[in-house]
Amino acid sequence: MKYLVGFCRLFVGVLFIISGFIKLNDPVGFSFKLQEYFSEAVLNLTFLEPYALWISIGVVIFEVLLGVMLLVGFRVKFTMWNLLLMIVFFTFLTFYSAYFNKVTDCGCFGDAIKLTPWESFSKDIVLLILIVFLFIKKKLITPLFRPYPNRIAVAIALILCVGYGYYVLNHLPVIDFRPYKIEANIKDGMTVPKDAPEAVFDYAWKFNVNGKEEIHHTKGDYPTVAGDFIDVETTEIQKGYEPPIHDFTIEQNGEDFADSLLQEPKLVMVVAYDLRKTNTDFYAEIQEMSVAAEKKGYKVIGMSASGPEQTDEISKAYNLEFPFYFTDETALKTIVRSNPGVLVLEKGTIKQKVHYNDLEELQFN
């Protein structure tokens, strides 16, 4: 029993630390996921949306600390109660998302590992079983060190988490798991391989045949039935290949310029997913940057999900000379965790990507 407790303790502790660290690497991305859960369409906790970022930071740091505390055996009763409460809450959340199909990705491991809602729920069920077992056998969880070294270990973990979180908040994630990382080609990320698996659907065709309802299943072809058609229900039974980058457009006046702009040998993108929430303190510097880039032969564009009214307003306020294009807000949030942020591309390949705090690091050859 002692060895089984030790294995479960190691497994749960390491998993909590890894899961927490991945989300701590990108707290802004995790806050976007929390906003989905807080939205009216899911949990209807809209009053929490403005605090999503700070909640996300608090949750992931606490998640890492609980993993460390379990491994070193520090304050076992407190640790086990909080692990149990946290996993019960996460299990409810993933079940709710899976059963009602509300959030298609729980964000448990950020962008590093994508899990379907039911996979997330299954993972939480396994963790729930292990944590309940550890909770029952908590007397067998002994401290790894004496009390003082244990406190030091937890304190060091807290300091490292806070410092790391502060850094990525004011710059960008240190490890970029997204399809828009440096050296990634956006056009390649949108391409579907020729041999990629296609989605398979089941079509349930309903007909009225001599006064009786009949259902005929096909993979898509309209069945030959001597009766009157009533309805058809479509069910996806096998997912097809989905490219890492999809629904990416660069629109202006209803026309998509993505293909031509991604062929530009020198392109600078100023990304601001929502101009109402953007940090306006840096737009004077962005204008100076755009002038310097254009002198080096770069084409500079703005990309936002805001409408013409907001783009015109900010352009006039800061004398921005580059045009703005419309791009989906979710795509822009994925591209760069900064509002605004700047990318430098060569024929669709991302060469540089910076937070607004790091504009001085941009280099134009």
Image (cartoon, rainbow, N blue to C red):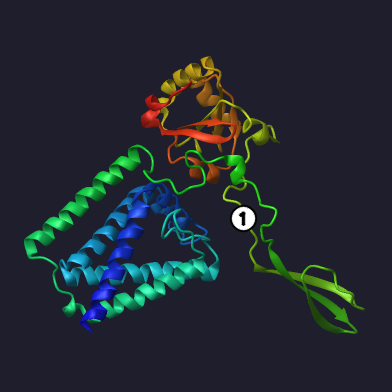
Image point (55%, 36%), residue name: 349
Q: Which element is circle 1 on? A: loop
- Which amino acid does the dot numbered 1 rest on? Glu
Dividing the picture into quarters, in which one does residue 86 lie?
Answer: bottom left
Examine the rendering and report whether any part of residue 135 can be seen: no
Check disc 1: other Cα within 10 Å, few if <14, some if 14-19, many if 20+: some
- Residue extending furthest top? 295
Q: How many marks?
A: 1
Front residue of 122 and 297: 297
Front residue of 265 and 118: 265
Q: Is residue 52 above or below residue 136?
A: above
Image point (45%, 70%), residue name: 121
User: At which x and y percent is residue 124?
Assistant: 40, 71
Front residue of 326 and 143: 143
Q: Is residue 7 above or below residue 66?
A: below
What quarter of the picture does the N terminus occupy?
A: bottom left
Image point (88%, 84%), residue name: 211
- Residue extending furthest front? 195
Q: Is residue 284 left or right of residue 10?
A: right
Q: Is residue 230 above or below residue 344?
A: below
Q: Is residue 95 left or right of residue 256?
A: left
Examine the rendering and report whether any part of residue 99 can be seen: yes
User: At which x and y percent is residue 247?
Assistant: 62, 46
Disc 1 designates what residue?
Answer: 242
Q: Is residue 282 above or below residue 333?
A: above
Dividing the picture into quarters, in which one does residue 348 lie?
Answer: top right
User: At which x and y percent is residue 29?
Assistant: 43, 49
